Amino acid sequence: MTTVLITGGARSGKSRFAQELAQRLGQPVLFVATAEAGDEEMRQRIEEHRRTRPTAWRTLEVTTHIGHHILQRIGGAQVVIIDCLTFLVSNVLGQFIGPTGDNIDELLAEKAVNREIDELIDCLNRIPASFIIVTNEVGTGLVPVNRVGRAYRDLLGKANQRLAERTDEVYLMVSGLPVKIKPPLGGV
């Protein structure tokens, strides 16, 4: 059993690589999808992702409290793919954004995201399965122009750090190519 975190930019091949890793393990898979279809374009993206998954995999679509839901629905799965942490943090953060969309209770949002990550780490520790977690690396671009964007970037960055510390392996996807960054090659 191993835990893997896959990070990178949009359309860098993260989901494809996660699915390839899971298929190589050759065990029953539970695929945990965290995206919500807020508009038609997003609905189409979700449908495209559904079509690319093997039909033998079970899918759990859940937007928050994923650790709890996985514990309840793990069944006989030996591999769990979580795709993705980026949407999970966005889903939690959305609960704390003001009605105009430009204000946020950052303290409450941070506490809620920390609880979500605590719950997920507890799940990783309790379930004897391999986990493959997909996330985005959002801190390498421009500083977001508004407070909500900056809060999101910061919260996702902290969540990524916590999971990278807990996982056995971390890959950075660059142009469809996985670059292993933990443990580093040569054990350095």
Image: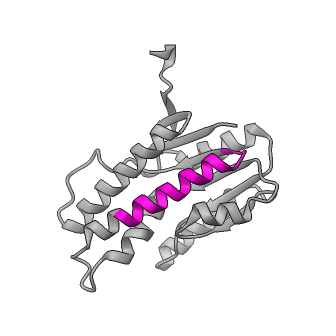
121 horizontally vs 81: left or right: left
Toward the viewer: 65 or 11? Answer: 65
Q: Is residue 26 above or below residue 80?
A: above
95 horizontally vs 21: left or right: left
Question: Is residue 74 in the magenta section?
Answer: no
Residue 83 x/y as whole percent: 56, 56
Give the position of the N terminus as an image quadrant: top right
Residue 10 x/y as whole percent: 43, 52
Q: Residue at x 47, y 56 (%)?
A: 117
Dominant secondary structure of the magenta stretch? helix
- The magenta segment is 111-130
Residue 101 x/y as whole percent: 26, 79
Question: Is residue 126 in the magenta section?
Answer: yes
Q: Residue at x 44, y 70 (%)?
A: 91
Q: Would residue 9 be seen by someone viewing this image from the given angle?
A: no
In this view, the residue farthest toward the bottom is 99
Q: Residue at x 33, y 68 (%)?
A: 109
Q: Residue at x 52, y 73 (%)?
A: 36
Q: Is residue 14 above or below residue 50?
A: above
Residue 172 x/y as whole percent: 46, 37
Q: Is residue 53 above or below residue 14?
A: below
Give the total number of marks visible in the rendering: 0
Q: Would residue 107 be seen by someone viewing this image from the given angle?
A: yes
Give the position of the C terminus as an image quadrant: top left
Instruction: Locate residue 147: give its quadrant.
Output: bottom left
Q: Is residue 92 above or below residue 19?
A: below
What colour scheme was applied to this rendering of the protein? one colour
